Image: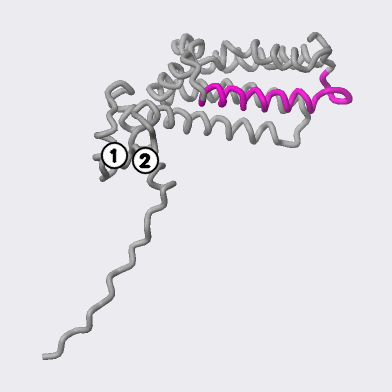
Amino acid sequence: MSRRPNRPAAFVAPVSEDRVEARLLAIAADHIRRFGAERVTVVSVAREAGMSHANVYRFFPSKAGLIEAVVVAWARSVEMILADIASAPDPADDKLERFLTAWARAQRDGLDRDPIIYATFASLWEARRDTIMAHRARLRGFLAAIVDEGLEPGPFRVKDEERAVAFVSDAMQRFVHPALVTEMRDLPRQQVEQRAGLLARVIIRTLVSGGV
């Protein structure tokens, strides 16, 4: 009786570390939504990922680091939206209006569609975590770039560029600071967006008139 030749073992491509990290973040985000950040454990995330908890620590230094990474991933999605607007070739005044309304809309989207992740984002914002401060700095950088584009001979007649950027950022706080956004959760979304849009137009008229 002839024997079948041995077949070579099927090749299994190694899973990249980026994919492993992305899977851990997805599982952690799901656990935060289901149980809240306080009840998430590295062990439960590792178990669902089919690995030891020691392996999770190769990617994240602690439970707090894992949770922070989930929040940063959400914040990066907001940055991508706003970066696309900031780099668009539109006139600076039109671009600024789109940027400000999109900024406010992204915050309300986070509150409405992913409230547990957004609440965790708010807590890290209040704690002034380095990663969140970096996120805030990048958004301010986008804003500063748009204001700079709009300086004369553009539409903005500002006396002090730094003060103008601070004015815009301060004026928008009601619609972009997570604690203040959360305070408005009971207001209809349409009403909040109308207010944000009105404020954006007032800000632009102020820059155009040289009021700052």
Quarter of the image with the N terminus is: bottom left
Say which residue appears at 75% left-offset and 36% top-offset: 89
Q: Is residue 179 magenta?
A: no
Say which residue appears at 51% left-offset and 26% top-offset: 131
The 10 Å Cα crowd at callout 1, few under 14, some 14 to 19, many 20 or more, is: few
The image position of residue 204, as x and y in percent, is 74, 17
> Are the two marked residues, 1 and 2, in contact with CB atoms closer than 8 angstroms?
yes
Report the residue marked by disc 2.
Answer: 58
> As drawn, is 29 to the left or to the right of 145?
left
Q: Which mark is residue 5?
A: none
Quarter of the image with the C terminus is: top right
The image position of residue 99, as x and y in percent, is 65, 26
The answer to which quarter of the image holds residue 11 is bottom left
Query: Disc 1 versus disc 2: distance between alpha carbons?
Result: 7 Å
Q: Nearer the viewer, residue 52 or 78?
A: 52
Say which residue appears at 80% left-offset and 25% top-offset: 150
